[in-house]
Image (cartoon, helix red, strand yellow):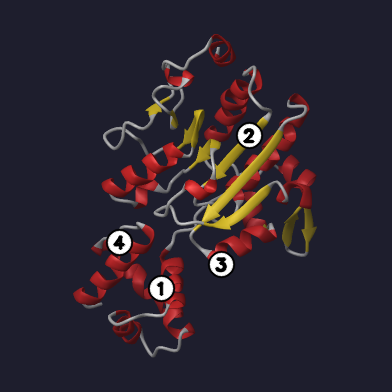
């Protein structure tokens, strides 16, 4: 691919999604964009690139961004964050007196839904210990296609074998041919919607828990800072942020601090989780 063509895609992806495309990843353009060129009737990627130099159709831009977006995910991915969610985060909210019995959870860059559905199954399992509680899980992604797939809650044998305990598969899924359909009661716990992490987040409302895992690794430093600080604005004072194991806030922003003793779990500096001024006796007892 010509350098000038590569630069067009690099700049387009950075502007529209925040993704950083480095020259060593340029080979992805050929494999992922050939189908897009064919779909839109262009003889080649080069012909499609020429259109991008003018005033490209919005649907073409959307398809290019979707094609270049990584949708790697699995049920209970990396395991530990879900253990922390169950063993540390939920007990805090359960023991917090004077707080409404309601949790809003955001699964950012939700891909095909395995993370958000893992959370809904976990909450369903914990329901006996949380009587009267209400849960809302909002799952967002930049890809309309992957969101449509996630809403179906229909997974291949390979997908359910990646991280999903057999007991949960038997309890919450129904086999349909060579695929597995997630039960409606679990699917209905999750609200899927399109959202670009570069956009204003105010319309999403406030969240108690945010999962934004394995997303920041695709952004440059200024974009990471912008996304993290915008997330902080949408979080409850005592909210929790989960990042991927290879991600950190150190050297990027002071909007979050690591929760002591918990890897990849963050909170606002003045929250009770970080020993801030808003720490209370009930909060400290719940965390003990």
> How far across and down, in percent of the image, does residue 147 sit?
58, 61
Mark 3 or mark 1: name the one nearer the start of the chain: 1
- The residue lying at 63 percent from left, 56 percent from top is 158
Asked if labels 2 and 1 touch by Cβ distance under 8 angstroms, the answer is no
Q: Distance between the residues labelled 3 and 2?
A: 28 Å
Could you say which is closer to the camera, residue 265 or residue 79? 265
Q: How far apart are marks 4 and 2 (CA)?
A: 36 Å
- Can you identify the residue that label 2 sits on? 103
Mark 3 or mark 4: name the one nearer the start of the chain: 4
> How far across and down, in percent of the image, does residue 284 sit?
53, 12
Mark linked to residue 239: none
- Can you identify the residue that label 4 sits on? 21
Q: Which of marks 3 and 1 is in front?
A: 1
Mark linked to residue 145: 3
Classify 10 Å Cα crowding around label 2: few (below 14), some (14-19), many (20 and above).
some
Instruction: Please tell me whether mark 1 sits on a helix, a strand or a loop.
Output: helix
Asked if labels 2 and 3 touch by Cβ distance under 8 angstroms, the answer is no
Asked if labels 1 and 4 touch by Cβ distance under 8 angstroms, the answer is no
Q: How far apart are marks 1 and 2 (CA)?
A: 36 Å
Instruction: Please tell me whether mark 4 sits on a helix, a strand or a loop.
Output: loop
């Amino acid at each position: 691919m010509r350098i000038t063509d590569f630069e067009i895609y690099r700049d387009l992806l950075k502007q529209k999604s925040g993704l950083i495309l480095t020259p060593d990843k340029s080979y992805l353009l050929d494999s992922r964009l050939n189908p897009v060129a064919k779909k839109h009737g262009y003889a080649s990627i080069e012909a499609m690139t020429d259109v991008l130099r003018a005033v490209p159709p919005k649907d073409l831009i959307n398809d290019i961004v979707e094609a270049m977006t990584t949708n790697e995910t699995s049920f209970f991915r990396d395991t530990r964050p879900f253990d922390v969610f169950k063993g540390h985060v939920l007990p805090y909210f359960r023991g917090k007196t004077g707080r409404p019995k309601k949790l809003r959870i955001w699964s950012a860059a939700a891909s095909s839904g395995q993370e958000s559905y893992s959370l809904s199954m976990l909450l369903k399992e914990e329901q006996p210990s949380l009587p009267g509680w209400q849960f809302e899980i909002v799952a967002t992604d930049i890809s309309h296609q992957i969101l449509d797939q996630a809403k179906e809650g229909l997974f291949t044998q390979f997908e359910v074998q990646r991280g999903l305990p057999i007991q949960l598969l038997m309890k919450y899924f129904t086999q349909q041919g060579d695929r597995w359909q997630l039960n409606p009661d679990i699917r209905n716990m999750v609200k899927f919607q399109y959202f670009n992490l570069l956009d204003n987040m105010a319309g999403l409302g406030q969240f108690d828990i945010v999962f934004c895992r394995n997303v920041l690794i695709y952004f440059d430093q200024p974009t990471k800072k912008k996304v993290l600080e915008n997330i902080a604005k949408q979080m409850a004072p005592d909210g929790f942020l989960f990042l991927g194991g290879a991600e950190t806030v150190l050297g990027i922003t002071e909007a979050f601090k690591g929760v002591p003793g918990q890897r990849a779990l963050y909170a606002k500096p003045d929250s009770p989780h970080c020993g801030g001024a808003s720490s209370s006796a009930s909060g400290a007892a719940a965390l003990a």
